[in-house]
Image (cartoon, rainbow, N blue to C red):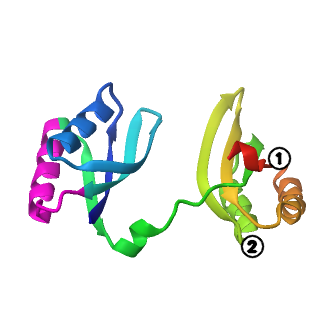
């Protein structure tokens, strides 16, 4: 099997997912894993696709270039090795939420604490909400980590340093 990692980005509008999915279907390309999001009028898709055995890389590159021209989206692709595709997606066992006044360094400080405890971020989402003259910041992370209690202790120190609220919630096995 041959696989590609494809990223598609551009101005958000109705029909982007349909257009990309239609192009993949037309080429007989299977979308195996994907993540899609819209942020402040911009849209991005990241997907791992399986190519038909009969399709050459030059054919897919030409088709993606045509899709770029037709839609105005930016499209990048790169081949994945079999061992990369065989790696299972990490299943999170913990959710971390952060809220408080916005400032530079929140993401770095929280993810530094997670990495120091040998945790891995599976998903991260942030948003900033204007409030009066300040901005309110929210972040949610799904992570995998062995010692949730130790992470809670470390993140409480980070919360105090940054003057934000941080909550760490272990996911129950049945919920995953």
Place of residue 85 in the rendered image (x, y in percent of width and height, measured from the top left)? 40, 66
Counting from the top left corner in percent of width and height, residue 29 is at: 22, 49
Q: Which residue is mark 2?
A: 116
Residue 50's disc number: none
The image shows residue 98, relative to residue 136, as above or below, that is below
Quadrant position of residue 152: bottom right
**Residue drawn at (85%, 49%), measured in percent from left and top?**
163
Circle 1 SS class:
strand
Q: Is residue 57 left or right of residue 153?
A: left
Residue 104 visible at all: no
In the image, is residue 86 above or below residue 48? below
User: Which of 16 and 32 lies nearest the eye of the viewer?
Assistant: 32
Q: Looking at the image, which is closer to me, 134 or 4?
A: 4
Specify few, some or many for label 2: CA neighbours under 10 Å numbering under 14, 14-19, or 20 or more: few
Residue 135 inside the magenta-drawn segment: no
> Which residue is pictured at 89% across the width and 55% down the height?
160
Q: Measure the alpha-carbon separation of dots 2 and 1.
A: 18 Å
Residue in the foreground of this view, choosing between 128 and 34: 34
Q: Is residue 157 visible?
A: yes
Q: Residue at x 90, y 61 (%)?
A: 153
Quick one: quadrant of the N terminus? bottom left
The first of marks 2 and 1 along the sequence is 2
Horizontal side of residue 91 vs 170, given as left or right: left
Number of dots carrying numbers: 2
> Which residue is at a point 26% across and 39% down the rendered structure image?
20
Which residues are drawn in magenta? 51-70
Point out residue 154 in the picture as x, y percentages from the top left corner: 86, 64
The location of residue 6, given as percent across then percent down, is: 31, 55
Say which residue label 1 marks: 167
Q: Is residue 58 magenta?
A: yes
Please, what secondary structure does the residue beneath circle 2 have? helix
Mark 1 is surrounded, within 10 Å at the Cα level, by few (under 14), some (14 to 19) or many (20 or more) other residues, namely some
């Amino acid at each position: 099997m041959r696989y590609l990692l494809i990223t598609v980005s551009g101005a958000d509008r109705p029909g982007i997912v349909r257009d990309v999915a239609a192009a993949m279907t037309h080429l007989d390309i299977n979308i195996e894993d994907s993540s899609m999001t819209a942020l402040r009028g911009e849209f991005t898709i990241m997907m791992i696709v399986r190519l038909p055995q009969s399709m050459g890389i030059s054919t897919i590159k030409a088709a993606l270039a045509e899709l770029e021209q037709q839609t105005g989206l930016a499209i990048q692709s790169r081949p994945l090795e079999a061992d990369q595709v065989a790696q299972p997606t990490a299943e999170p066992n913990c959710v971390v939420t952060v809220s408080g006044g916005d400032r530079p360094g929140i993401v770095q400080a929280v993810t530094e604490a997670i990495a120091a405890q040998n945790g891995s971020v599976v998903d991260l989402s942030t948003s900033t909400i204007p409030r009066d003259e300040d901005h309110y910041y929210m972040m949610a992370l799904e992570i995998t980590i062995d010692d949730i209690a130790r992470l809670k202790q470390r993140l409480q120190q980070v919360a105090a340093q940054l003057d934000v609220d941080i909550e760490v919630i272990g996911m129950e096995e049945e919920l995953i």
